[in-house]
Amino acid sequence: MATPPNRDLPEVVSELIIEMHEVRSELNALNGRVDRLERTVEDGLRLVREESRQNTDRLIEAFSRSMEPLINRILDHEQRLTKLENPQ
């Protein structure tokens, strides 16, 4: 078994400091990527909510338009029944 080479304390500390700076730099880069991803997801969710709201508005309008003839017929029948029940 080979014995590890003896290194003096300043050399070890120096290597640890260099390693620490590299790790810190990588963490900062990762944090930047996470921040960009969060913004992208938030923007995407905002867009989906807006599209959903617009689609809901369009569906309500389309449903209202499609029900209008039926509602008008019901109102016509109601007016006729009222005239038959209360002739004047």
Image (spheres, rainbow, N blue to C red):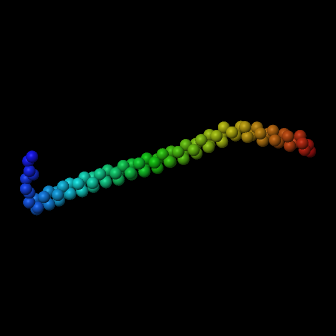
Residue occupying the point 8% across, 50% down: 3
The mark total stands at: 0
The image quadrant that residue 57 belongs to is: top right
Q: Is residue 38 left or right of residue 64?
A: left
Query: With respect to residue 72, does 24 lie above or below?
Result: below
Residue occupying the point 53% across, 45% down: 52
Query: With respect to residue 72, does 3 lie above or below?
Result: below
Q: Which x, y percent locates residue 7?
A: 8, 57
Q: Locate the C terminus and report the quarter of the image it occupies.
A: top right
**Which residue occupies the foreground of this view, 58 or 15?**
15
Q: Which x, y percent locates residue 50?
A: 50, 48
Residue occupying the point 57% across, 44% down: 56
Residue occupying the point 78% across, 41% down: 75
Q: Which x, y percent locates residue 9?
A: 11, 61
**Which residue occupies the foreground of this view, 77 or 19?**
19
Q: Residue furthest right?
A: 88
Q: Is residue 43 left or right of residue 30?
A: right
Q: Which x, y percent locates residue 77?
A: 81, 38
**Which residue occupies the foreground of this view, 42 or 59?**
42
Q: Is residue 17 left or right of residue 29?
A: left
Q: Residue furthest bottom?
A: 10
